[in-house]
Image: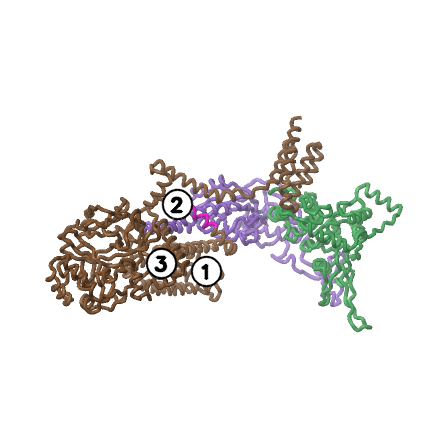
Chain colours: A green, B brown, C purple
Amino acid sequence: MHPQLQDAMNQVSQQVIGKPKQIKLAFTCLLANGHLLIEDLPGMGKTTLSHALAGVFGLDFSRIQFTSDLLPADMLGLNIFDSTKQSFQFHPGPIFNQLILADEINRASPKTQSALLEAMEEKQVSLDGETRTLPTPFFVIGTQNPMHQSGTYPLPESQLDRFLMRIQLGYPDWQAEKTMLLEQNINVNKTPQPSLSIATFIQMQEQVMKINVSDAILEYILKLVTHSRENEGFPNPLSPRASKALLQASKAWAFLHGRDYVIPEDIQAVLPSVAEHRMRAALSDFNGQTSLSDRLLEAIDPLAA
Amino acid sequence: MISSSKNHAHIILTLVFLCISLSLLAPVMGWILILVVCAVVMRSALYLDLHKHAPSVRTLNLLALLSAIVLAYFSLQLGVLLGMINLLVLACSLKLMQLRSIKDYYQLITCCGFLIGCGFIFQNSIGFSLFYLVLTLLLLLSLACHISPSLGINKNLKRIAVMGVQALPIAVLLFIVLPKIGPLWQMPTSKSHQTGLAEKVTPGDIAQLSQSADLAFRVTFSGNIPLPQERYWRAIVMEEFDGKTWRVSPERKAIQRQYKQYNKEFKPVLSGRYFSYQIITEPTHQNWLYSIDIGVPDSPQSANQIWQSHEYQLTSNTALVSNFQYSLRSFPDALLNQALYSVDHRINTQRPDSGNPETQRWVKNLRRQFPNDQEFINQVLAFFAEQPFEYTLQPPLMQSNPVDTFLFEQQQGFCSHYASAMAYILRLADIPARLVTGYQGGEMREQDYMSVYQYDAHAWIEAWHSDKGWQRYDPTAIVAPNRVTFGLKTAIEEAAELIDSPFSLDGFSSIAWLTDVRLFLQDIDFVWTKWILGFDKSAQKDLIKSLIGELTPKKLALFGLSVIGLIGLLLAFFFVPSLRGRKRDYISQYYQKSEKLLAKLHIYRPKSQGPLDFANSVERKLPNSLHQPFNQVTQIYMQHQYTKTTQQQASHNKALMKIQWLRLKKAVSRQLKH
Amino acid sequence: MFGWQAVAERWLNKRIPEAHKYKLNYRSIFIFPSRFGGLFLLLCLGLFILGSNYQNNLMIFLCYFLLSLFLLNLFIAYLNFAKLEVQLGKVKHGFAGEKLQIPIWIHNNKRVSNGLLKLNFWKLKHSVNIDLDDSTYPVYLPLDCEARGKLKLPRVTLTSTYPLGLISCWTHLAFVSDILIYPKPLASKVRLISKDDLAEVNEADSTAKGHDDFDSLAPYKQGEPLYHVAWKQVAKGQGMISKQFSNQSGATGWLMLASLRAADIEQKLSELCFQVIELTRNNSTFGLDLGNLKIEPSSGTEHQNACLKALALHSPYLKGVNA
């Protein structure tokens, strides 16, 4: 792995303790130039993770707490009449930052949600007929609370798939939580230091683009998505956008592991994060069955001709 | 209901139909061709979206009815064959106009296929054959476009080309091997399509001898080749003269019919030096055959197909609707006195009593001076030599008393004028004489074969000699000796009549390479005619004989089986590769083999596991000696499957893969022994 | 006639047994010259006769060439067809009297098969033509569902005449399916019956449609969803007023087959079907009693599906068990 990347990851894992896999996935998502959805209960470290990520990459960071009365203008910014200059002056909203933490995304009204999702997709915002480009890189880390859905507007499936990946943090294990508490006790200040520049990061993203994907890998991806389309048990089959996302994410995963080519294991590693939220909208449907992505993976032999 | 708009299948079919119809320009009537063009224009407009609606069924029915009436009116003079072809073209053009359903489309395709076949009746040169082959392939292309419309015309074209190339060897095998059968029934031939020599000659009527450079027949000699002045190809013997026109005697025809009925063929006994040769005629749709003087069939095959009649005239049993090959042996020195003299004499002294008074007077005078037949004949020939006769292809018309006019006024004419006049003179002198038409000359291509063209057509006479029988006299040879020795070409070149003659193109013959090309094309055409067009029963038999030796039933059965086997092999060659499907590549195969080796140790890769995970799990389960080679195998496999490798690396990997696999195999077998 | 068909069906069942997915092979493919193929052979015969009679070698050669093509076509057609893989897609449940769209997936991943492909249900006329070179999948085959119950999917017939229309390749595939056809919903009054005293607890006077309909306005109560607020009235300054929808949630009772007055059992089932759907839409809790089968009161989609399944499969002569 890239030493700078390794350093960044180490820093983040000091902040978010005991979640190496999730951190790796989050890195993958950013390297793949996609947006990340973190779905978990409050207090699981969603915000900490986002903070840490912004810190190590040295990205401008802003946090938008979504509430039901949040208006699109609160997020995007607005034109305000400046009486001294006798003209409208644009006051950019918090979205004009490189990394946005959109907290509790499902609390906002659908209108605000779709404004955010549009900005995510287009990487630009249109206000009063004027188009403004968002900074590069531009990431959104959305968080969603799966429980206590009352008074919320859950994201529809069609919008969920704007997020490249969805991860869950989950409770830390005994040892990790203990470490966390210990550190809290001695109150160590561990503000993350930017360990790689934006330029390097963008360079890495370009390298990810160049990762070699062989025909066998493409076939494997196609077999996976086709299986979800043709067989019973997959309420929302995977779309071509999903297969693109899968490819992109597995390339980033391969890069993260210091390979310049994708192997089936990469796809298997990212598939649950990339595909599960596209195939089943709400986590609440998940009633102890095997996850859909596992069922998908089990059905396909990656080495078959 | 299928739309024609942007329908490649339809437009290709339309164009093919247009091409076929145009290639049948001669047999198809003009007004039908106009209908064809209308239909083609209509289809093209529909294809290009210039027009939206095909004509209604009612309009077409009306049109069909009218056309049918007109065609019925013409059908009597067309005869069965031309009638059928005209009807087919007409029906196709009407169908093309109303092409609506898939059924219509298929019917049209079938009809067009049949029309292509019919085209071969009229045209069978290499050029036209290739043209029709292309049309056939286009017809198939139309079908391909119909069945897979969105494959694109290029891909369909490629498919058809491949299919055509694959079908060709099978078709050739079938062609060589499948037994040729004779005509199942006598096919109607159309009078209007007869070519070659005419059955009657009216010298005075023709102002200009129509000539063509078309081939009449080709000859290959085995042994001696006749000298130019010996190349008199007898074809039709005309014994009936009415003062103007010579024609085949009806009495002769009646006699011949009788003989045929009892199957009593005239078999002259011949001896002396002979020429042995084989003739391939072009189709004439007539029955006359050609031979040098008296020819008799040289092979039993030919003997079955040829009828020799008492005027030493050969006819084929069936009309020459395609190229016909036969072998003859000719005895130029044999005497033609074996037929019944009384009949010959009776028929060949008939002459009209009235007409040509001057000639009658002149002959009476001359005959009084020379009562001896031979002397009289010599005098007549001398007359032709002494008088200022001129050989020309464009003589003036001589309609009343043509012989008088020719002999004493105009003194200009071509072979049939001279021959007709002389035969008439001899008959007036009570010497049996008859007109013979055929060809004189022939162009030898090196020592291989001789080509005789339509412009070599000639007429001469035969007169009866009491001892020697029928003797040939050629008055034209006396007037224009070059006509006989060097051919018509030289004769008319001297007469400065090159213009409008078939040789005008030969003006270029001074350019050497052009002549070479012409001769080369002729050679190809000869091979084509001899081996493709003339590939008949006996040729087939010879070919098979040369392949397997003597034809015993056992051998033939074996031969048939081997041919079927050969076709099977061809098919296997074409299709087995795609039947086997995609074969896994070398390295993947070895990876699979390695997996099988591990399976012996009861280590299986779960279906969904990737190679790296599997290798790791193997590492945990097996000792170093085993997992190390497998690790290597996995590494190579992954490099091969998932990375870009150069050609060099790939071949290196192949070698390496095998080595590592062998290591693994050894390790596994060692493990199993313990 | 019927006997013959039964024999054919038995034979087919043996030769092409039911499966989830088919990879076409020599066992499942039938191959025979198409109608046009017959015409084509007739053309060859015509050319042969004409060619023989005119002793025209070229015509005979043309005939042999066409025959060779025919022979090649036999193989090409088979190979083209044999590369197809066919699978039944996800089928939703249908209602009797509806046209059900049956999805069929055709695997032609590497574009190895080409040409037009005709799909239809065996013995049914309606067919769908697709072009294997340019198609989207799945292909939907419409099927009329006439009677409720477990749908016996007819065999799916695939026909291709690639490459030149001379040879017809076809197959009749039987897919394993468990498609349920629910009774046709018949608008009727919802009658929930209390189990205890078998008295009607609630003869709702709801009309056939209307549970979703706006009913009345009432003062806003804390906890009501915001989207029920009648903003128009609020804007007029009438205070917080929320829309009330006719809503019977909370009504608990039984739908009973025996209590229906319709004469025909099918009609009764149809009415029940309608009521089940309506009640689920209203989020009601209800049970279903079909006499030989009882489904305990519950609510939600799962419950609805269970009820509809029971209705679809109900047979009055079967001894049932309590679900």
Using the rendered image, report if marks 3 and 2 lie on a common chain: yes
The residue depicted at 68 percent of the width and 46 percent of the height is A262
Q: Disc 1 or 3, which lies upstream in sequence? A: 1
Q: Is B361 left, or right, of C4 in this rendering?
A: left
Q: What residue type is labelled 2?
A: Leu
Between A221 and B662, the residue placed more toward the observer is: B662
Q: Is C151 left, or right, of B448 in this rendering?
A: right
Using the rendered image, report if marks 1 and 3 lie on a common chain: yes
- Sort mark 1 into few (<14), some (14-19) or many (20+) by Cα contacts within 10 Å: many
Q: Disc 1 or 2, which lies upstream in sequence? A: 1
Residue situated furthest top in the rendering: B674
Q: Which amino acid does label 3 sit on?
A: Leu
Task: Describe the element under mark 2 as helix, strand or loop.
Answer: helix
Between A229 and B583, the residue placed more toward the observer is: B583
Between A149 and C53, the residue placed more toward the observer is: C53
Q: Which residue bears the numbered disc 2?
A: B174
Q: Is residue B542 visible?
A: yes
Magenta stretch? B162-177
Q: Which residue bears the numbered disc 1?
A: B11
Determine if the magenta segment contains residue B155.
no
